[in-house]
Image (cartoon, rainbow, N blue to C red):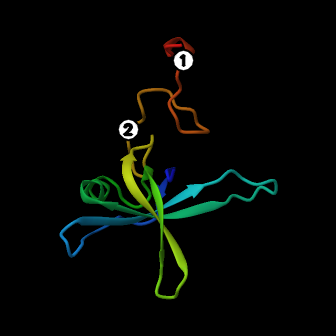
Amino acid sequence: MNKISIMGRLTRDPELTTTQSGIEKCRYSVAVDEPKDKNGVKKVNFFNCVAFGKGGAFVQKYFKRGDGIIVHGRMDSYKGNDEKTYWNLIAESHDFPLGKASGQAAPEEPVDASSGMPVVETEELPF
């Protein structure tokens, strides 16, 4: 199974183009932070992403450089002109994480600062 989900920030504004067959295609890059290593050095991974059709138009309309984004999709490889193998995350869906680079209202529900995920009280769980 080839599934991947990432949460990070856009490193540049999404670029929306149209393929020769008339399908919208949006390219963007996402920086994903990793925890600091034992020496206190923080590592960042960069993912090149591609979204097609309505998904591509959605990203171009609602996201810009610095905005947080959650991307769900699959990894796809291709050979470049230099014969090297490159990877793209082919986006299948997108979500808004809590918080944006530019003034977004504070979320209405409590958020875990370490993960950015909503805090769920145990009384709310159905099990």
Q: Nearer the viewer, residue 120 or 72?
A: 72
**Can you say whether 59 is above or below 116 in the image?**
below
The numbered mark at residue 38 is: none
Other residues around mark 1 within 10 Å, as few (<14) / some (14–19) / many (≥20): few
Q: Quadrant of residue 45?
A: bottom right
Q: Nearer the viewer, residue 116 or 74?
A: 74
Q: Residue at x 32, y 56 (%)?
A: 59
**Can you say whether 87 is above or below 2 in the image?**
below
Q: Residue at x 52, y 35 (%)?
A: 117
The secondary element bearing badge 2 is classed as: loop
Q: Quadrant of residue 28?
A: bottom left
Q: Quadrant of residue 27?
A: bottom left
Distance from Cα at disc 2 to Cα at disc 1: 23 Å
The numbered mark at residue 105 is: 2
**Can you say whether 66 is above or below 48 in the image?**
above
Q: Is residue 32 visible?
A: yes
